Amino acid sequence: MHSQSAGLGALLQQRLLRGEHLTLYGPRGSGKSTVLAQLHARLERTGIPCAYSPATTALDDITRALERAYPGVRTGEVGRRAARVRLWNAADRRPGILLLDHFRCNGSAMVSCLRRLHGKVAGVLTAVDVEAETERSRMRSSRYGAMPVRMPLSTVRQLRRLLDVHWDALELPPLEGDAARTFVTAARGRPGWIVQCAQLACERRYWRDCGPLVTVLCLDTEAAVRYQALAMVRAPQPAGEGAVRDFRPRPAGRLRRD
């Protein structure tokens, strides 16, 4: 994670430890999930009760996150409502932090639960996909008192450095300047877009003798970034912490630099 995102993570951690409820918003692929995952790793090292939910679209996703934050609470022998009461009581005794990625508020039950978490867990951070400032009105964070925080976009220099690092790591043929500039422009400040583009470029179908099919690769990268984000909030999540599988089929052949 580059220094800009690292600085944001440190700021978010301070605010969460003060008991704030926050909504981190920004376009798909801008690095919100990376910030949450690294925050989770840092908080786990401190011993503070903490849980990360890779997708949060139902009340039980929040309940399962609380169960992971407080594994000593016996919830399997009671109903889910009683389990939440036990978990809230545990949070009263020892405050913790919830990191709820790919958040989508569906129904008043989730709103009620999030409101009840105020004053119990130390802080809650939700991550929401917002493609443009005009879409901020769709965010429902104000319904449960969360303060919005905008995900900063990466600079052109940061994106070009990231592109070079991933391109070289995957042993892909060198990029011409025009192709690299096109990829960076199409990324629109989103480091996740660059990472996805490099991964797709490993497939032979995106290459010809003259070089990569830049336009096709840009279109497919945008589609992949959007599809993966939608798949996270649509697919049922397992009870454990396992990551959702990549939607793309295994490529028939991967390109390597001669």
Image (cartoon, helix red, strand yellow):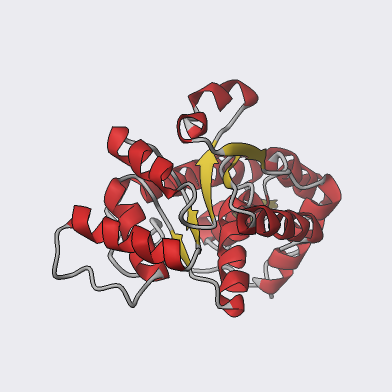
Please identify the quarter of the rendering in which residue 200 is found.
bottom right
Q: In terms of depth relative to the viewer, which is nearer, 159 or 7? A: 7
Left of 27 or right of it: where is 238? left
Residue at left 57%, top 58%?
Answer: 36
Q: Vertically, is 210 above or below 43? A: above
Left of 147 or right of it: where is 8? right
Q: Vertically, is 68 above or below 115? A: below
Please identify the quarter of the rendering in which residue 82 is found.
bottom left
Residue at left 75%, top 60%?
Answer: 162
Residue at left 32%, top 70%?
Answer: 240
Q: From where the camera sits, is residue 165 visible? A: yes
Q: Vertically, is 38 above or below 180? A: below
Q: From where the camera sits, is residue 257 visible? A: no
Residue at left 35%, top 75%?
Answer: 71
Question: Which part of the image, by quadrant, shows the N terminus?
Answer: bottom right
Question: Which part of the image, by quadrant, shows the C terminus?
Answer: bottom right
Q: In terms of depth relative to the viewer, which is nearer, 39 or 179? A: 39
In the rendering, at what x and y percent does residue 26 appear?
61, 39
Q: In terms of depth relative to the viewer, which is nearer, 181 or 189? A: 189
In the rendering, at what x and y percent does residue 253 appear?
47, 68
In the rendering, at what x and y percent does residue 115 appear?
42, 40
In the rendering, at what x and y percent does residue 193 appear?
62, 49
Q: Vertically, is 168 above or below 244? A: below
Q: Residue furthest front?
A: 93
Q: In terms of depth relative to the viewer, which is nearer, 138 or 202? A: 138
Number of labels in the image equals: 0
